[in-house]
Amino acid sequence: MAATEKNFYGTGRRKTSTARVFLKKGKGSIVINEKTLDEYFGRETSRMIVRQPLEVTSFLSNFDIVATVDGGGMNGQAGALRHAISRALVQYEQDETGTDDSGTGGGPIKRSLRKAGYMTRDAREVERKKVGKHKARKGTQYSKR
């Protein structure tokens, strides 16, 4: 009987996008909403953003990634995926190596991801439009006469 592969899960958010990521040991394939990374993201910068946590931790060809992304635009979704992959890698580190978060700042994977800035959720969101304004802050043009 074959041993079941363990999945490592991470949720990431950016702007109005939400990403759910499942990592499992594999050859490095990345599938997003049932499409490959190259099919889903047309821009090379978005693909680079998604791969950043794997490059920092040198796990680029160690894991297969299956992700579902919803909401927002392409840049927000890429940022949400980066956040989710980082969290899943930290879960892998905690499960596999047995490192504990009790005041030590985590293991080497978490420390390197936090130093690179991938563990922090970027909380910037679009400000809502106000009543009587053209946009969130832009008012009507002042007329002297």
Image (tube, rainbow, N blue to C red):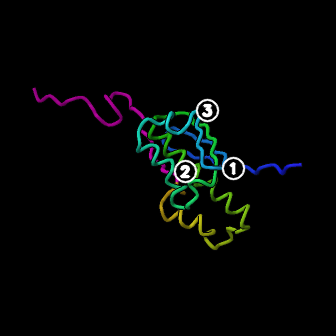
**Does residue 120 lie above or below 42 as drawn?**
below
Question: What type of secondary structure mainly makes up the magenta span?
Answer: loop
Q: Which residue matches tag 3?
A: 34
Q: In this view, does 104 lie to the left or right of 39?
A: right
Three-letter amino acid code of the residue under disc 2: His
- Residue shown at the point (69%, 71%) measured from the top left: 102
What is the number of the mark on residue 24? 1
Residue 60 image-quadrant placement: bottom right
- Residue shown at the point (55%, 55%) measured from the top left: 54
| Separation (CA) of disc 2 from disc 3 | 19 Å
Which of pointers 1 and 3 lies earlier in the amino acid sequence?
Answer: 1
- The mark closer to the camera, 1 or 2, is 1
Q: Which sits in the foreground, 1 or 110? A: 1
Which of pointers 1 and 2 lies earlier in the amino acid sequence?
Answer: 1
Q: Is residue 137 magenta?
A: yes
| Separation (CA) of disc 1 from disc 3 | 16 Å
- Give the image location of residue 93, x and y in percent: 67, 62
Q: Does the magenta stretch include residue 92?
A: no
| Separation (CA) of disc 1 from disc 2 | 17 Å
